[in-house]
Image (cartoon, rainbow, N blue to C red):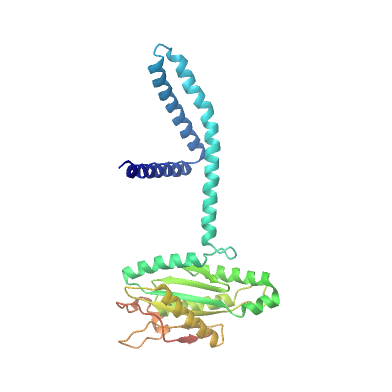
Amino acid sequence: MQDDAGPGSAGVVGQAGRALTAWLLRIGLVRAVLVIAGFSVISSVLITGVSIHLTLPRIALEEWLYFAILTPAVISPLVGVVVMSLAYRLADAQRALASLARTDPLTGIGNRRHFIDSAEAFLALAAEDADPVALLMLDIDHFKQLNDRYGHAAGDAALIAVAQCCSRRASVLGRWGGEEFCILLPATAIGVAAVLAEQLREDIAALAIPAVPEGVTVSIGVAAASGERFGLDDLLSAADRQLYRAKAAGRNRVSSAPPADGDRPARPAVAEADRPHAAALTSRMNVAINPVISAGGKP
């Protein structure tokens, strides 16, 4: 029984210690040092007073009380400053490491891992409410040739510019890898997503990038799902297929796939966009399959 109680007690003490440390970090360095100093003084008075009362009951009150207060009042603030400064530095380092683990260092947006975690969380919420969800996968056209012609610094500048442009329209954005980006659009039907993708394509084509005089273009694949169950892998695969259709059709265009619906034919993307809240919801996940390719804003 003692073996079982030991680890449990240690766990409770550890949790209490972590909670106390987190609270001290929240209240700030000065307040934390004052709290530590005050606790040290009170503890010193209590411990010293009880000890002397039990061992030397005839000693004068002023004598032990003076030392019991003075000693921790001088030492504990100095120790508290050192300890709390180290604690703040450790907390800052931990936050920085956590941010690096989830952020693309070049563009400053979320990396692949961060996008997957965020997208899965949004998909879970969408499944509960039976809301539609759309996903955009975009790729910078002829990125290798851009690097070969202007150098990798120019390629980096293009990636940063595209990421910043996407971040102005994206709910959930991540650099998928290389020159590919993914955007998740919660509560967005396929028609609206296709219109947004076309607008994004035009915005990127209009970017002024000094390192790349002729600018850059992107190909975008759009897929959507709705219903009670969502699979991120299926949605990514559908968007990836549409991205390759856009590339095969000449690049610098959007390829979208309306959700499959066995009861009636899919409506055109423009008609869907005119009524963004009228998208039909089904009881199972519907992933885009029939391509609708557009270029320059024309279906």
Residue 92 screen position, x and y as percent: 54, 49
Residue 65 placement: quadrant: top left
**Which percent across, then down, holds residue 286?**
36, 79
Considering the image in quadrants, where does the N terminus appear?
top left
- At horizontal 51% and vertical 77% (from top left) the residue drawn is 199
Q: Give left or right: position of 109 versus 279.
A: right
Placement of 112 over or under 9, stated as above or below: below
When the figure is inspected, residue 105 is found, relative to residue 88, above or below; the finding is below
Q: What is the x, y in percent for residue 77?
A: 52, 31
Q: How many marks?
A: 0
Query: Is 245 situated left or right of 215 in this image?
Result: left
Q: Is residue 210 visible?
A: no
> What residue sits 37% from the left and 44% below the top?
7
* Up/down of 274 relative to 55, above or below: below
Question: Is residue 231 visible to the viewer in this orientation of the structure?
Answer: yes
Q: Residue at x 66, y 79 (%)?
A: 145
Q: Is residue 12 left or right of residue 180?
A: left
Residue 81: horizontal and vertical position, in percent?
54, 36
Choose top left, top right, bottom left or bottom right for residue 154. Answer: bottom right
Measuring 54% from the left and 84% from the top, which residue is drawn there?
247
